Amino acid sequence: MFSLRLSSNVTKWQIFKLSIPIFFSNLAIPLVGIVDTGLMGHLESEKYLIAVSIASTFLTIIFWSFGFLRMGTVGLVSQTFGKSDYRELVNIILRNFCIAFIIAFLIIILKPVLIDIIFEIFGASSETNSYIKDYISIRVFSAPAELTIYILIGFFLGIQRTIISSSLIIMLSILNICFSIYFVNELGLNVKGVAFGTLLSSYITFLSFSAYTYFYFIKRFKVIPRFAYKKLFNFKKIFKLLIINFNIFIRTVLLTFSFFWITYLGSTLGEEYVAVNAVLLQLIFISSFFLDAYAFSTEGIIGYALGKKSLKMFSSTVKSSLILSFITGILISIFFLFLAKEIINLITDLEFLRFLTYKYLIWIIFIPPIASIAYQLDGIFIGATQTKELRNAMIVSVIIYLFLSVFLTKQLHNYGIWFSLLLFMILRASTLHFYFSKILNRFK
């Protein structure tokens, strides 16, 4: 149902239909953060919430920095799929698997360094630092599973089987929520409980869908996945993969750092603002995961269009996806206008935290429509593997954003942090638009 037989004119309805399962899976992802935040927010001390907010955000930066394992996979898989080279699809996955395991090993052995860095940056209380260390010491061992899950998601997005990639994410999220609730509420493990929840759910999901993907290749493509060393370790293709991955790596590090920067700026105002912004960021992540549904489904179509050299398919996809994304951004803003306070009340029952958070809801309402354009252009550039331009646009945007955020925070306190995030979304869209002609030139 959710794999399109694409014509040269891709309609809004086709993109919407392809995005339906991604909507549901992307809803599941922020629910994990909301449940984890809610579990900590209902404990006796705000230090649990602060510790999980800092530690999970920090590790999210680490893991999302290697988001190229998904994004690079989508672009290469979709273009190779457009050429009907099914054996090379296996090689793309296996090459990225090798890279993922090496990265995961390095993350694990560098655990003490990561803990020292986070202590140095935030300078939290000794009790909060103890909880942070507990969380990271457990969660870091999920790296092999979490990073390889990125690759599996990227593969199924690349071949436009969005219902399969979405099922993977939903399974991961549901397991994570169930384990976390059990470990925290039943076993009383507080911070350790949510870390163990992520660890176990990641490995169960990774092993299940690795087996599924193996048999999917046999059934769908009549190809048995195996290590073909000469084709797998093709220097030219490995070099191309590394260049694509490195550019996306730089882009993703900067993007995730930009969100982490919000947590840091909040800490300069006081620990209570770390908690406030952690709650508000959950709402931002809700909107971004919905808006990313169009970007994710578009990535595969854009790559497929390039593989087929169809400018008409590319142009219709870009137009339809941008319109859909912007309309969805407006609907999200309307939703937050009426229901944001109720969501916040579910996340925490600390009255002082609720009161402070309400003051900044106006920014959560303004951001989604503007951010929708940046998210969608991201997907277009990723599907086209136009990663050099993606990297350069992010570098320019982040540099300007950092200067603006420091100035605005001094002038407007926490309002300045959220105003600067709004400007950051505008900068991302503007810089990517500047490079758009680079993609069009590939159809000549």
Image (tube, rainbow, N blue to C red):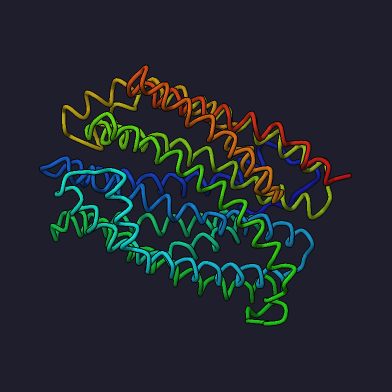
Residue in the image at 37% along x and 53% along y: 59
Residue in the image at 83% along x and 46% along y: 442
Residue in the image at 63% along x and 73% along y: 217
Q: Position of residue 371 (x, y in %)?
A: 53, 31
Image quarter of the N terminus? bottom right
Image quarter of the C terminus? top right
Question: What is the tally of numbered marks visible in this picture?
Answer: 0
Task: Answer above or below: position of 358 versus 301.
Answer: above
Q: Nearer the viewer, residue 264 or 425?
A: 264
Q: Position of residue 383 (x, y in %)?
A: 68, 49
Q: Position of residue 82 (x, y in %)?
A: 76, 58
Q: Nearer the viewer, residue 187 or 220?
A: 187
The residue sitting at the front extreme is 120
Location of residue 187 (image quadrant): bottom left
- Answer whether residue 1 is visible to the viewer in this image: no
Task: Answer above or below: position of 412 versus 164.
Answer: above
Residue in the image at 53% along x and 57% along y: 165
Q: Nearer the viewer, residue 398 or 282?
A: 398
Task: Answer above or below: position of 316 versus 101.
Answer: above
The residue sitting at the left extreme is 44
Task: Answer above or below: position of 244 versus 314.
Answer: below
Could you tell whether 311 is left or right of 213 in the image? Answer: right
The residue sitting at the right extreme is 444
Location of residue 326 (image quadrant): top right
- Answer whether residue 331 is visible to the viewer in this image: yes
Could you tell whether 283 is left or right of 400 in the image? Answer: left
